[in-house]
């Protein structure tokens, strides 16, 4: 949550699948569901809601990350388009 907002935006928009390495630990994200408005998504959250939820999580429980704007979510959706869940390798490519 405290890393680049562009990564967490894409995790919520498109979901996450496979192993994730965090601070030397391996977590299996068997399938983080897709919350964005993409084909096959059961949630279909709009960009405002995704931005609000991510801003809240990035600033609660001791997190000190900056807010996520609706425009940032919209730009990620527009740039990336409709796709399946992301892998750790794909996520690391996002700056």
Image (cartoon, rainbow, N blue to C red):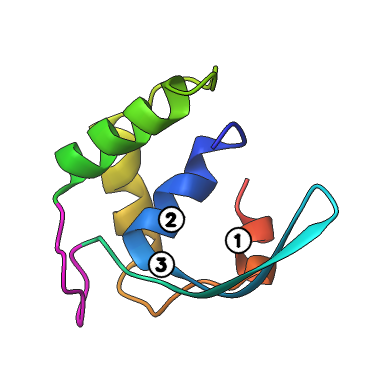
Give whichever of discs 1 and 3 has the lower sequence position: 3
Residue 35 picture location, percent across and down: 26, 61
* Neighbourhood count class around disc 1 (C-alpha, 10 Å): few under 14, some 14–19, many 20 upward: some
CB under 8 Å between callouts 1 and 2?
yes
- Cα distance, mark 1 to mark 3? 11 Å
Q: Is residue 93 above or below residue 29?
A: above
The question of residue 43 being in magenta is answered with yes
Q: Is residue 29 above or below residue 95?
A: below
Q: Secondary structure at mark 2?
A: helix
Residue at x 80%, y 47% (from the top left corner): 23
- Hey, which quadrant is residue 2 in on the image? top right
Q: Main secondary structure of the magenta part?
A: loop
Magenta range is 37-45
Q: Secondary structure at mark 3?
A: loop
Front position among marks 3 and 2: 3
Residue 44 picture location, percent across and down: 14, 63
Give whichever of discs 1 and 2 has the lower sequence position: 2
Relative placement, left or right, of 25 versus 69 is right
* Neighbourhood count class around disc 2 (C-alpha, 10 Å): few under 14, some 14–19, many 20 upward: many
Label 1 belongs to which residue?
91
- Cα distance, mark 3 to mark 2? 7 Å
Residue 60 picture location, percent across and down: 43, 22
């Amino acid at each position: 949550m405290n890393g680049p907002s562009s990564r967490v935006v894409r995790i919520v928009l498109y979901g996450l699948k496979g192993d994730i390495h965090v601070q030397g630990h391996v977590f299996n994200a068997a399938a983080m569901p897709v919350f964005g408005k993409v084909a096959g998504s059961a949630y279909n959250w709009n960009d405002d809601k995704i931005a609000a939820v991510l801003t809240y999580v990035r600033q609660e429980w001791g997190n000190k990350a900056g807010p996520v704007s609706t425009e940032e979510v919209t730009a990620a959706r527009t740039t990336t388009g409709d796709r399946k869940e992301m892998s750790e390798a794909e996520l690391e490519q996002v700056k």
